[in-house]
Every structure is written in structure tokens, then in C-alpha cells.
């Protein structure tokens, strides 16, 4: 059985849908990953063969003012999952982020590039990556700019704002790869099926800015909205974000044969399947 921790989150729900009856899910209420006893109780009772950790504190700006909670959930929580999954002889799959990088490399990041997080969220996720070492049978899957059918995300935010305004201002100096949770879930499944270990990058193919992403959302949705440019500095959010954090996914393709589709194709499919709120 595959245990999805954080099954009510955006990625967690997608993983549950993909794994179907092979999966069992737990979230807040049934497990608190910051509590070792809670993790021990759940994992030793359910005895999964694989634990996929999709639970996290993902409010990037919120992490700046709640750094203790960020480190507890994104850092220590992973240590607990790693220690107990090792005890029950299960594999641990940890989902991580492009925000462990500073974005100054100027070309796509490879798995062994040195992390240098700019934000508390990035630091806490890096702590989580390091804590996976308590279970040698671990997989770290770094991804970025996620959107999916079951969660608050950039696509839904843009569509909501488009109903209220004719013009939006969106940053055009952060470059990355928008990634559909369905394609990430397929990548995670491919990595588990091949029993891969270590660190992998998984994101939809191609790159754009948040501004370019917003324009494509409106083009595909047939909405007339002007998307004006703005710099990250002008936006002035609490957490610093990497400016160029695209992920080289060559290792994923080489080791599993699975290559995530171009981000525009994924977005089109997502919008076709989307149930309007
Ligand atoms: N969203 C994105 O753009 C990206 C996300 N990632 C990573 O992907 C993973 C999944 O992200 P996403 O689906 O967006 O996350 P969500 O925020 O949608 O879901 C996270 C889930 O974890 C739960 N959770 C929080 N704290 C705990 C806890 N102490 N114990 C148990 N469960 C807890 C949350 O519950 P509640 O809501 O009640 O707090 C929620 O159900 C995370 O590791 C994230 O860092 C990586 C790159 C990009
Ligand atoms: C809503 C809005 C956002 N923006 C900007 C802010 C931000 O830089 C960018 C995207 O906004 P978000 O709040 O979705 O971005 P953010 O929370 O930084 O998204 C990140 O989440 C974490 C969990 C990750 O791991 C990252 O990979 C990444 O997906 O768009 C605008 O410029 N104008 C707007 O109207």
C-alpha cells in the first residue's frame, strides 16, 4: 500500500486519484507530522510499503512570519517520516521545490547543483530534504509552480481576478515552468515503479514568466484581460523568490522513460477538464 501523507492538499488529491485503491491517505486530523508519536502510530498501524509526503506548509510569504512552524512542518516533520518509514522498511518519497535554489545560475538547475534558498520556505524545504537521510531508501522529487484541480493556485487566482478586473499586473522577471499536479503525480508514479532513489527534478517542459503564464491562461480560456508587466521588486512581497529557477528534468526521463509534456499543453488540458467554481 502507498500512504499519501497530506492527501487533502492539491498534490495529495491528485496522487490519491492516480493511485486509486493502491493508496491510503492521511492528513491533519489523522496525522500531525510535527509529532513523532503521531507519525509512529499511523505508520506502524498502516505499514505502507511507500510513504509519499505531500504534506507541507506552502504559504511562502506566511513562512517568513511563522518560521518556527515552517521548520517544524517542512523540516522536522520529514525527519519523523524518514525515521519511522525506515523502521517499518518503507520507502519515503519527499516532494520539494525549486525555491531551494537562489535562481542565480542562469541555466536550468540539475539535481546536484548547490542549493541556496532565499526564503524561510526554501530553507525549511531544504531542511526537509536533508532530513530524508534518516531513511536511506528515499526519493526527493523537486518540482515548481504547481497548479491542480484541488487547491488554491495561480491559475485559479488569475481566473478569479479576471472576473473582477480588465487589467492585471503580474511579475515578468521570475522565470520557471508551470507544472500540472497530474503530470507531477505521473512522474512520481514512474519513479516509484522503477524503484528510483536519490534526487530528481520533475516539471512540465518549457519555461515562461508568471506574466507569460497569466497571458496563456487568459488566451486558452478565451478571456480578454490585459496583463501588464511588473518587477518582483515593485511587487514587494515578504519572501524573496528565485528569478530563474527552471529545473533540468533529464535525469527523470533517462531513468524512467517518462517526460512531462510542454506546460502549454498541460494547461490546455487542465482548463478543458476544469469544473468552474
Ligand atoms: N504549490 C506549489 O506551487 C508547489 C509545491 N511544492 C511542494 O509540493 C508538496 C505539495 O504541495 P501542495 O499540494 O501545494 O500543498 P497544499 O498546501 O495544497 O497541501 C498540503 C497539505 O498538508 C497538510 N498539512 C500541513 N501541515 C501538516 C501537518 N503538520 N501534518 C499533516 N499534514 C499537514 C495541509 O493541511 P492544512 O491545509 O489543513 O494545513 C494540506 O492538506 C509540498 O511539499 C510543497 O512544498 C513544490 C513546488 C511547488
Ligand atoms: C496574484 C498575483 C501574483 N503575482 C505574482 C506573485 C508571485 O511572484 C507570482 C506567483 O504567485 P504565487 O503566490 O502563486 O507564488 P508562490 O507562492 O511564490 O509560488 C510558489 O509556491 C511554492 C509553494 C513553491 O514551491 C514554488 O515552486 C512556487 O510555486 O505571481 C503577481 O505579480 N500579480 C498578481 O496579481
Image (spheres, rainbow, N blue to C red):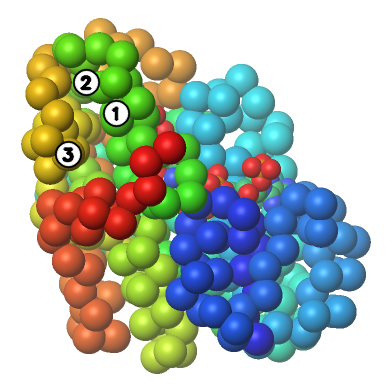
Spatial separation of the CA atoms under disc 2 and disc 3? 17 Å
Query: Is residue 84 positioned above or below 118 on the image?
Result: below
Q: Quadrant of residue 242?
A: top left
Q: Nearer the viewer, mark 1 or mark 3?
A: 3
Q: Residue at x 83, y 70 (%)?
A: 42
| Residue 41 place in picture, x, y as percent | 89, 70
Mark 2–mark 3 contact, CB under 8 Å? no
Mark 1 CB lies closer than 8 A to ligand 2 = yes
Q: Is residue 161 above or below residue 41?
A: above
258 lies left or right of 206: right
Q: Residue at x 46, y 75 (%)?
A: 18
Confirm or deny contact between disc 1 and disc 2 (CB under 8 A).
Answer: yes
Q: Secondary structure at mark 2?
A: strand
Q: Which residue is mark 2?
A: 170
Q: Is residue 133 at all visible to an observer of this figure?
A: no
Q: Quadrant of the C terminus?
A: top left
Amino acid at each position: 500500500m502507498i500512504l499519501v501523507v497530506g492527501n487533502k492538499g492539491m498534490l495529495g488529491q491528485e496522487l490519491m486519484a492516480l493511485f486509486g485503491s493502491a493508496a491510503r491517505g492521511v492528513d491533519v486530523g489523522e496525522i500531525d507530522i510535527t509529532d513523532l508519536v503521531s507519525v509512529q502510530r499511523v505508520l506502524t498501524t498502516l505499514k505502507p510499503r511507500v510513504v509519499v509526503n505531500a504534506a507541507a506548509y506552502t504559504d511562502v510569504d506566511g513562512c517568513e512570519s511563522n518560521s518556527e512552524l515552517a521548520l517544524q512542518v517542512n523540516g522536522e516533520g520529514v525527519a519523523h517520516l524518514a525515521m519511522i518509514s525506515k523502521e517499518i522498511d518503507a520507502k519515503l518519497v519527499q516532494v520539494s521545490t525549486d525555491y531551494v535554489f537562489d535562481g542565480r545560475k542562469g541555466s536550468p538547475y540539475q539535481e546536484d547543483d548547490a542549493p541556496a534558498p532565499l526564503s524561510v520556505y526554501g530553507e525549511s524545504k531544504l531542511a526537509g530534504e536533508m532530513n530524508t537521510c534518516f531513511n536511506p531508501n528515499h526519493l526527493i522529487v523537486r518540482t515548481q509552480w504547481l497548479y491542480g484541480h484541488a487547491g488554491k493556485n495561480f491559475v485559479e487566482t488569475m481566473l478569479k481576478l479576471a472576473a473582477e478586473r480588465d487589467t492585471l499586473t503580474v511579475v515578468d522577471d521570475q522565470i520557471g515552468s508551470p507544472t500540472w499536479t497530474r503530470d507531477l503525480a505521473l512522474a512520481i508514479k514512474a519513479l516509484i515503479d522503477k524503484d528510483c532513489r536519490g534526487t530528481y527534478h520533475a516539471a512540465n517542459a518549457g519555461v515562461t514568466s508568471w506574466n507569460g503564464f497569466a497571458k496563456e491562461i487568459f488566451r486558452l480560456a478565451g478571456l480578454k484581460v490585459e496583463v501588464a508587466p511588473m518587477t518582483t521588486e515593485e511587487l514587494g512581497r515578504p519572501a524573496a523568490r528565485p528569478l530563474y529557477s527552471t529545473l533540468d528534468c533529464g535525469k527523470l526521463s533517462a531513468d524512467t522513460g517518462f517526460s512531462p509534456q510542454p506546460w502549454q499543453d498541460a494547461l490546455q488540458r487542465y482548463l478543458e477538464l476544469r469544473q468552474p467554481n
